[in-house]
Amino acid sequence: MTQHWRPDTCGCVVEQLYDYSGTEPVLTSQRIVSACADHINSGAADVYEENVSKNMALWVLAKLHPERTVHEHEWKFAGDRTLWLRPHRDVPKAALRDFVAELERAMAAVLPEERAAALARRVRLA
């Protein structure tokens, strides 16, 4: 089954093909069908990884400071595709001490460990 995905991290449209023959759907292929300016020379995996990075970073912030939801933090990608996060103003600095280590662990659960580490290093707290 084919579906189109529009990430909230850029203007791309990605076509994904899933196999539903088993108990869980399996992504078998994906490609960019409409690239934004930031991903003209990228693959669908880059778009996916950026989206995972943003989602995981917000999830880790919420885990470290559960008094705030993921929607209460600001985020944006810089021109070099570094993800900048601005935690809610009442998140104490002490709650952010383990942010990078927690982010690497969370991302390693869904991406290969070396990719998770590399992507986690491209996330910055503002």
Image (tube, grey):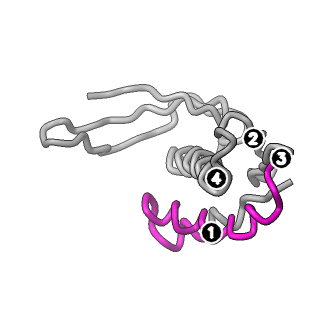
Q: In percent of the image, x 78 and y 59: which residue is there?
A: 124
**49 left or right of 123 in image:** left
Magenta residues?
Answer: 91-118
**69 left or right of 74 in image:** left
**Residue located beneath label 1 in the image:** 118
Give coordinates of residue 53: x percent, y percent: 60, 52
Q: Disc 3 vs disc 4: which is toward the camera?
A: 3
**Residue located beneath label 4 in the image:** 57
SS under mark 1: helix
Q: Disc 1 vs disc 3: which is toward the camera?
A: 3
Earlier-in-chain disc, 2 versus 1: 2
Which label was assigned to residue 90? 3
Amino acid type for the residue under numbered disc 1: Ala
The answer to whether residue 21 is above or below residue 78 is above
Residue 42 appears in the figure: no
Q: Disc 2 vs disc 1: which is toward the camera?
A: 2
**35 left or right of 85 in image:** left
Earlier-in-chain disc, 1 versus 3: 3
